[in-house]
Every structure is written in structure tokens, then in C-alpha cells.
Image (cartoon, grey):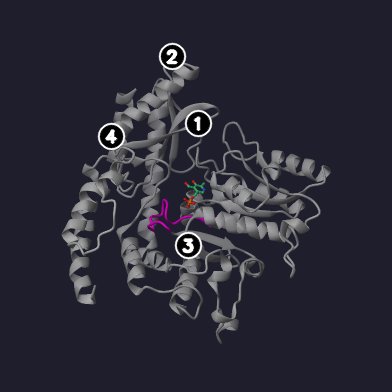
């Protein structure tokens, strides 16, 4: 394809994207596709000859779009917001267009330095300390894995001979909340701690936040048993109820044992953009590492996750590789992001953030987040006031956990009722929620914060909830 052919095709595609975004409110929120349906609609073999763009776009429209749960729909209340602001989509297009090879500073100095600038912008916007150094990862799962490896290497006394876990005299233990996201235990296991050295610390029965006293007890018991506490992962904004682990108290306990503290604020981190919400993150500034996802609530299109670490030299010592073919004269003066994480080749993700922040401005993003907080408080107040309905966890941010509990309905019958009304809502196509288990019983998470969701949409949702039960 020549640049001229690209120009024509891209205009057509951009028009299609704009039309698609405009009509999302008319689409069902949840994909209605049956398993295998999309595969069956596509040819088994790749085309030998070029096809017209119009045919490709027709298939995009008729086959692909119905196979997407519409997270940009005003009725999307599932999982966590996965906003994809059009400003950041432009940045993604620009990133593809400039086609930078992000392997070293030399291969794309702009990729490195724009990333340094935007991660510093976000650090400042979030009120984080200047000794937090940021890199963009694909996802929080990767960021947490990188942090677990760094924590492991610190506890195992990283040295020139890189003995790794085999060189450790006592088992290294990792601690996290019983409500941490599944990516946390996954990262702990991938980093080699072993299932027997992963502790799920008790949470408070009302707030669902980690109990620092329980953490202290678990660490003391491990030390008594000859193990070494190596890392604590504080879940700030758990996926189930958006509980906020008390980071300051966790840091206090962890410090006694020299353990690394990693904060997983994948979704909630966006709230650090709001000075009035920063009390929920108190102590995060003392952590060793922090991950949060602009690709969730803030709305920079996936994939765009920020990993901040305090001790960059240690991280680089864990991650660096210096083959001769990657050396350049600038090495002593520049950041090499390949040494801040796992992949060598990195995408120019910073452009998504750069476009998003420059075209929207932080003020508009903050206003949208505040709107969502107010909508969540409004919905929680309606639910609390309605007979038979319960809000099951504190609504610190934008997630409202609810159950409708008709009199006399308990146990499995209550679970069936919950799943049945949630399913009815999802099947309606007008809204989408994610049921999940809390204290061994099904409940429904209503995660407010899709970019187009206004108060009128949340009011309509409340009507729909009452009609569904
Ligand atoms: N941590 C928390 C608290 C999450 O809610 C999620 C995803 O929803 C993740 C981590 C994983 O995020 P990612 O998809 O960026 O790996």
C-alpha cells in the first residue's frame, strides 16, 4: 500500500470508526455471539489476492462488531471501566503511523523521552513523589510481575552471579489481600515464590480491606517458622468491591521485615488525579512500586499501564541485558526502557497518553471522574433507601456492590435470584453488569465510569434493576 492509497483508505476507515462510536448506544452492550460463530463466518484460508477495503469494512461491521461487548456504551457497568477516549485513539493511530522500533534509546529517542515526560506528567497530576520513576507497561498484570521479580531479587540478595531463588537460604514469602486481583497471585507464582509461600491475608469483614494486624501476625509466624517475608502487595481498589487496603499501615508492618511493598491500584489509580480522593491512597508514596492503568477509568485506550518504581537502579540490575548489538555511544546518558521490564521491543504507547492529555486536558478528565463518583453515590443512596435492596460494601469510588434480598430468600435460592436478575439485565442489551461472589454469596457489581455514562443513564439503570427483580 502506498502512502496515497493509505490516505484514501484511512479516511474511509476513520469515517467508519466515527460512525461506529456514534451508534454504540443503539447496540446491545453484551456481545450476543455464540461460541464459534465468528470463526465460522470467516474463511478458513488467508486470501491470496488483495480484497477491496469495502469488503473488509463490511465484515468488520457485520461479523466483528457484534462480537464485541461494548465497553464504550453508556450502559456498560461490567468489570471495571475500559474507556478508550477518541483523543487517545488518535495517539494510537499516530503510534502505529510513526512505526517506531522501541528497543533502545538509539532506535527511537522520542519513544523514550516522550515516555519519560508523560510518566512524569502523570506522577505530578497524581501527587506522587519525584523519586517515583515511571515506565509504561502493556498491563497491570505485567507491571505486577515485574515488581514481583524485583522484590524477589532484592530479598534474595541480587548479585553478579544471579543465583536466584536457588541461592536463597530461607523460603521467600509474598503476602496479599484475599481480595487481590487474580493477576497478583499469578505474578507471585510466575516469579517463583511457590504456592506454599503465598499468603492471602484476612480482610476486614465490613470494608474488605486488608487487616494490617493480620499481616503482622502472618509475617511474624513466617519468621518464626524460618521463612523470610519478601513482598506485600496492597490491593488499592480490589476488583470485587473496590476495597482500599490501608497502604501506610501495610508499609509500617512491611518495613519491620524489610519487605518490598507493591501497590496494585489498576483501576482505582485514576482517582489519584483528584486531590480530594488521595486520602484513600495514603502511604502509597512510601511504597517500592505502584501499578495503575490509565487504560481503565481514566480512558487512555488499552494497553497503557503505568509502573512506578522507587529504586530504578535495582530494577535495571534485575532486568538489564547489554548485548553488543544494542550498545550505542549515548548509553551512559540515557534511559533504556528495555531494562525497566521484560520485553525488548516496546510500542510507542506514550503517544496515547500524550494525545489524550493534550487534546482533553487534565481538567476535563478530572471533571468526568468526579461525575462518576457522584453518580455512584447517588445510586448507592437509592439502593440503600429501597426495601429489599442492600449495598454490600463501602462505595469509596465508583463501584456499587448490590443484592436484592426478598424476604425469606436465602442460600442457593438467593444466589439463583441474583444470577437470574443480573442475567435478565444483561440479556436485555440495555445494560451490562458483572455478578461476582462476596462472602460465599453471589452479588452484583455495578461499576460506574464508562465515558458516556451520565446521570440519566444511571437513573435508567436503577429503573431497570427494579424492573428486573
Ligand atoms: N488489578 C486489579 C485491581 C484489576 O482490577 C485488574 C483488572 O481489572 C488488574 C489488576 C489486571 O489489569 P490488566 O488487565 O491491566 O492486567
Count residues near mark 3 (Cα–Cα under 10 Å), then give few for <14, some for 14-19, many for 20+.
some
Mark pair 4, 2: CA separation: 25 Å
Local secondary structure at mark 1: strand
Farthest residue, direction bottom: 329
Foreground label between 2 and 1: 1
Residue at left offset 34%, top offset 39%: 35
* C-alpha span from label 3 to label 1: 35 Å
Instruction: Give the Cα distance between marks 1 and 4.
Output: 25 Å
Q: Return the residue at label 4.
A: 460
Q: Which residue is mark 1?
A: 437
Report the residue marked by disc 3. Answer: 125
N-terminal-most mark, 2 or 3 = 3
Res 347 seen here? yes
Range covered by the magenta-colored residues: 291-303
Q: Which residue is mark 2?
A: 407
Q: CA distance from mark 2 to mark 3?
A: 48 Å
Would you say residue 128 is visible in this rendering?
no
Which residue does the image show at 23% across and 42% down from the upper left? 27
Task: Count residues near mark 2 (Cα–Cα under 10 Å), then give few for <14, some for 14-19, many for 20+.
Answer: few
The one nearer the camera, 291 or 273, is: 291
Could you tell which of marks 1 and 4 lies nearer the N-terminus? 1
Q: Can you give x and y, in whole percent of width and height, for residue 366 in the image?
A: 40, 55
Gap in angstroms between the C-alphas marked 4 and 3: 33 Å
Amino acid at each position: 500500500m502506498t502512502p496515497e492509497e493509505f490516505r484514501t483508505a484511512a479516511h474511509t476507515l476513520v469515517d467508519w470508526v466515527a460512525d461506529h462510536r456514534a451508534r454504540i448506544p443503539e447496540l446491545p452492550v453484551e456481545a450476543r455471539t455464540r461460541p464459534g460463530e465468528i470463526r465460522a463466518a470467516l474463511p478458513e484460508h488467508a486470501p491470496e489476492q488483495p480484497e477491496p477495503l469495502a469488503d473488509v469494512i463490511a465484515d468488520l461491521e457485520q461479523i466483528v462488531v457484534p462480537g464485541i461487548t461494548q465497553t464504550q456504551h453508556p450502559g456498560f457497568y461490567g468489570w471495571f471501566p475500559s474507556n478508550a477516549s477518541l483523543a487517545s485513539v488518535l495517539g494510537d493511530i499516530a503510534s502505529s503511523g510513526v512505526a517506531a522500533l522501541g528497543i533502545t534509546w538509539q532506535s527511537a529517542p522520542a519513544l523514550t523521552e516522550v515516555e519519560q515526560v508523560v510518566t512524569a506528567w502523570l506522577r505530578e497530576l497524581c501527587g506522587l513523589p519525584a523519586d517515583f520513576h515511571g515506565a509504561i507497561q502493556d498491563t497491570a498484570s505485567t507491571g505486577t510481575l515485574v515488581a514481583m521479580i524485583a522484590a524477589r531479587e532484592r530479598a534474595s540478595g541480587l548479585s553478579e552471579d544471579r543465583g536466584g531463588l536457588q541461592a536463597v537460604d530461607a523460603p521467600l514469602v509474598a503476602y496479599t489481600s484475599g481480595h487481590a486481583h487474580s493477576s497478583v497471585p499469578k505474578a507471585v507464582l510466575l516469579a517463583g515464590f511457590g504456592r506454599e509461600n503465598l499468603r492471602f491475608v484476612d480482610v476486614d469483614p465490613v470494608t474488605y480491606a486488608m487487616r494490617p494486624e493480620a499481616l503482622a501476625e502472618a509475617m511474624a509466624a513466617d519468621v518464626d517458622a524460618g521463612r523470610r517475608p519478601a513482598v506485600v502487595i496492597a490491593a488499592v481498589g480490589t476488583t470485587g468491591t473496590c476495597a482500599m487496603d490501608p497502604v501506610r499501615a501495610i508499609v509500617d508492618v512491611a518495613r519491620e521485615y524489610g519487605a518490598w511493598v507493591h501497590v496494585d491500584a489498576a483501576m482505582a489509580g485514576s482517582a489519584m488525579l483528584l486531590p480530594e480522593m488521595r486520602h484513600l491512597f495514603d502511604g502509597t508514596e512510601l511504597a517500592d512500586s505502584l501499578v495503575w492503568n490509565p487504560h481503565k477509568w481514566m480512558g487512555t485506550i488499552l494497553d497503557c499501564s503505568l509502573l512506578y518504581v522507587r529504586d530504578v537502579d535495582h530494577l535495571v540490575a534485575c532486568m538489564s541485558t547489554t548485548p553488543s548489538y544494542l550498545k550505542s555511544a549515548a548509553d551512559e546518558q540515557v534511559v533504556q526502557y528495555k531494562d525497566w521490564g521484560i520485553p525488548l521491543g516496546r510500542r510507542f504507547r506514550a503517544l496515547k497518553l500524550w494525545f489524550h492529555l493534550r487534546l482533553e486536558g487534565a481538567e476535563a478528565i478530572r471533571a468526568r471522574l468526579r461525575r462518576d463518583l457522584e453518580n455512584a453515590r447517588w445510586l448507592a443512596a437509592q439502593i440503600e433507601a429501597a426495601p429489599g435492596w442492600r449495598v454490600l460494601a463501602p462505595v469509596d469510588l465508583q463501584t456499587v456492590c448490590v443484592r436484592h434480598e426478598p424476604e425469606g430468600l436465602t442460600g442457593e435460592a438467593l444466589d439463583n435470584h441474583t444470577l437470574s436478575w443480573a442475567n435478565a439485565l444483561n440479556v436485555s442489551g440495555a445494560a451490562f453488569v458483572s455478578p461476582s461472589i462476596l462472602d460465599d454469596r453471589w452479588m452484583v457489581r455495578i461499576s460506574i465510569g464508562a465515558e458516556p455514562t451520565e446521570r440519566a443513564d444511571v437513573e435508567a439503570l436503577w429503573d431497570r434493576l427494579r424492573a428486573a427483580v
